[in-house]
Structure formats: structure tokens, C-alpha cells
Image (spheres, grey):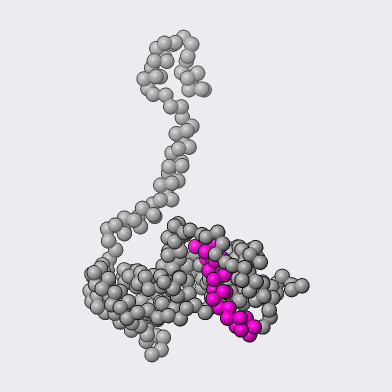
Amino acid sequence: MTPIKHEDEALRQVLRRAYQEREKGEVTDQWQEEVMRRIRELGEIQASPSFLAMFEQLVWRLAPVTCLLILGLTLLLSSFDFISGYDVIQLLMNSTEEITLNQFFGL
Amino acid sequence: MDTDSHSSADAEVVDQIVSGDVNAFEILLKRYEGHVVRIVKKHIPFDKVEEVAQDVFIRIYQSLPNFKRDDSFKQWLSTITIRTCYDFWRKHYRYREIPVSSLSEKHQVWLEEATATKSSQSFDERDSQKKAREILDWALDRLSPEDRMVLELVYLEGYAVKEAASLLGWSTVNVKVRSFRARKKLHKLIKEML
């Protein structure tokens, strides 16, 4: 029986040899012309990055800060009760004897 | 021409192109065509080599303003080539269709014999390159683009983890872990076939 390590190494050698023996074809002559045609179509390259590229960079740089800010605000907001000012007044007007400000704010 | 003078010559051509001489790109294209095609051929199916190599040169052209004169142009170019190959597999992976089994019993018998044989001579005698390639492609097609690239670079080409990490733009830890897992997956796939 062949040891597992030896088997793995043998397999690796077989695969490596197969990998290195890729088909030996060359690219065609028209290939270079086609690349240059596409390059000329693109025209001159901009030495300084475009507005879009700069904007993209800025967005990615600010992304972690934005995420943290959103998370922080979400936590902060979730600790408050969502009652509109109108509802608060309604509540106080309807049962002034029962609800004091202390009760309302949970103090 | 030694490496230093080659690098400065490359940097001069890059300056020419960036300052508006589009045709000067032909110098870089002729100088590095062989190098790029050699890398692409290792990672991409032969019928797609021309297309991907073309994309590599377009990407190189568009990235020229970002090239730093102190860096080696050849190394920079190799990095773009590897990443373009990786992008090819990422796109391909989304639309791939895996046949249930494209390998015959002959492949299985051959693989069993090949892994059991110590001498490389008997491997060559079997007229087996095609079969080996088919088995390897079959297994690689079942791996994710990340596993495939890292496996090809580290396990099959023998790149150091650090080099592979620099080519792929990943951390060395990521390459190490992924390379180990990918190798396990490949061995598992092939052993399941046996």
C-alpha cells in the first residue's frame, strides 16, 4: 500500500507536469494589430484621474465612517420612544390627572 | 540589455504614452507580448488566450498613469495579467455549466496508475499529457475562481506565498489558508473519482 503523503506528492507531480505542458500555440499576427486598433480607439490617456474615479475613491474612503455613523445613529434612535409631539400633547390633554411628566419620561 | 536599463527604458516609454503618444504603446506591446501570453496561457483555456491577453494590454494602457517609476514594469505588468485572468474566471464562474461527468473510465484508470507509478518516464510513455490536462481542467472547473487561482500559482506553478499574495493583491495569510483548503479540495475531488 502506498503511503498517503507519497500518493499526494505523486499526484502533485502528475498535475504539475500536465499544467506546465499547456498547448504551445502562438498568437496570430492580426492580434497585435487588433490590440493597437483598440488602443488608438481609446485615445490619449488622462494623466490625472477623472472626476468619476476621484469620486469613487472618496466614496470608498468614507464608506467605513458612514457605516459606523449609521450604526451609532441607529443605536441612539432605538433608545428613544418614537412618539410625535402631537401624540404627547394629546396624551397630556386627555388624562392630565393620571400621567405626570415623571411617569411619561419613565423617571 | 540589463534589468535596470530595461526598467528605465520602459519608464521612458510610459512617460511618452502618458504625455499623449499613443503609438509608443506598440513598443511595450512588442516587448512584453510573449511574457503576457505565456502567463495567460497557463491560466486560461487556449481558445480564450488571445481575447484575455488583449484585455490585459487594454488594462495596462488604461493603468499607465498609476505606474510608479520606482517599481519594476515587468512585475507591475505581471500583476495586472494575473488579476485579469482572475477576473476572467470570476465572470466565467457566474455563467458556468458543469457537465455531470465529462471524464471516462479510461481517465480514472490512467490516474490510478499514474499516481501509483514512481517514475516519470512511465508517465510520459502513456501518451498521457492530454488525459492529465483533462483531469486537471475537470477538477479546476469545480473550484471557485479564488481557489483556482491560488492553487495554480502556489501548488502548480510553485510561487512563494508572498509572491502569490502580491500578484493577487491578497494578504499572505489569506493566500496561505486558501491554498491549503484549495489543495485539500482538489485532492478530494480527484480521489473521489478514483
Residue B8: percent from left, percent from top = 35, 83
Range shown magenta: B121-148
Please identify the quarter of the rendering in which residue B173 is found: bottom right
Residue B130: percent from left, percent from top = 54, 76
Is B122 above or below relative to A49? below
Residue B71: percent from left, percent from top = 40, 76
Say which of A9 and B48 sits in front.
B48
Say whether residue A35 is left or right of residue B82. left
Point out the residue furthest to the bottom here.
B1
Q: Report the residue at 55% width, 78% height from top.
A: B129
Q: Report the residue at 46% width, 18% height from top.
A: A101
Can residue B28 be seen? no
Task: Give the main secondary structure, helix, strand or loop, of the magenta stretch.
Answer: helix
Point out the residue furthest to the top here.
A97
Point out the residue furthest to the front here.
B105
Residue B182: percent from left, percent from top = 58, 64
Q: Report the residue at 60% width, 65% height from top.
A: B186
